[in-house]
Amino acid sequence: MKRQLSIIVVVLMVLMLGVIAIGLSFGEPPDHPMDRYFIENSQLESGANNVVAAVLFDYRGLDTLGEAVVLFTAALGTMLMFRIREEE
Amino acid sequence: MQMSLIVRTAADVLFPFIMVYGLYIIIHGHVTPGGGFQGGAILASGVLLLLLAYRYQEFTRIIRMVMMKSLESTGLLLFIIAALSAMVLGAGFFYNWLFPGGLIFGEFVPFGPGPANLNTGGVIPIMNIAVGIEVVGAIGVILLALLSGIKERI
């Protein structure tokens, strides 16, 4: 009974996600004024040829700072978990 | 466990090339695809290659945990200082104050595709380098911590 229930749940989940995924359009993202703004102005405003780098480090620098802090915290947590105990 | 002679020699030969490629990805972050995170991960993969080819104790005699920790902290500090340096000059946090006419990385970039110029981008290359240092330190710390628990038969 439990097994059948889990199979039904899996099938329902696949159907749900599949219907949503089929409904999406691939390859043609809708035109947004923000994209155009970044493509046309990022070179003149930030001076970087790479628009992705301009967005990462200039327009949304605070977001990148958060990413760096997340990585720092991950390393800190790993160090805390695997610290070498002196008494052993 | 120490790997065989073939693996160790191959790791020795490959290591400098991996380092050079990672540094290239970091330094060219504002011109070509890539950047601090990706280049730092490549550098850390080179460290992992040496770590897997040699014994843990032998490796940590040369590259210590403290070095990786200080690299991590230095990178994050450099990143925050590069972001804060704009506030000293009266602009906002993360303002790109080096770009038009700065001392370094300050050359003008015309609109559209053009030849790559490393001397552009303002504070973006500095932040790329800072993030690269931080990522190699953080991943190095994680690798050293995770592999420190292996009981080795020498």
Image (tube, rainbow, N blue to C red):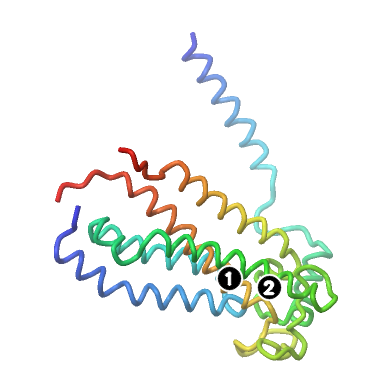
Task: Out of B19 and A23, give the one closest to the viewer.
Answer: B19
**Horizontal and vertical percent for residue B73?**
55, 62
Q: Is residue B73 left or right of residue A43?
A: left
Residue B52 in which image quadrant: bottom left
Task: Out of B153 and B20, give the one closest to the viewer.
Answer: B153
> Residue extending furthest top?
A1
Check the image and report above or below for B153 versus B116: above
Name the amino acid, label 2: Ala
Check the image and report above or below for B111 versus B92: below
Residue B78 in which image quadrant: bottom right
> Residue extending furthest front?
A87
- Which residue is the site of mark 1? B130
Callout 2: SS:
helix
**Horizontal and vertical percent for residue B60?**
31, 60
**Horizontal and vertical percent for residue A12?**
60, 25
Q: Which mark is residue B91?
A: none
Q: Are marks 1 and 2 in contact (CB under 8 Å)?
A: yes
Q: At x 66% / y 89%, what residue is drawn?
A: B104
Check the image and report above or below for B57 versus A78: below
Do marks 1 and 2 share a subunit?
A: yes
**Horizontal and vertical percent for residue A69?**
62, 55
Q: Is residue B76 left or right of residue B88?
A: left
Residue neighbourhood size for the residue with mark 2, other residues' Cα within 10 Å, grouped as few (<14), some (14–19), many (≥20): many
Q: At x 60% / y 52%, what residue is drawn?
A: A70
Q: Chain of mark 2?
A: B
Q: Is residue A59 left or right of residue B56?
A: right
- Which residue is the site of mark 2? B82
Q: Is residue B30 left or right of residue A58?
A: left
| Marks 1 and 2, how far apart at CA | 9 Å
Name the amino acid, label 1: Ala
Callout 1: SS:
helix
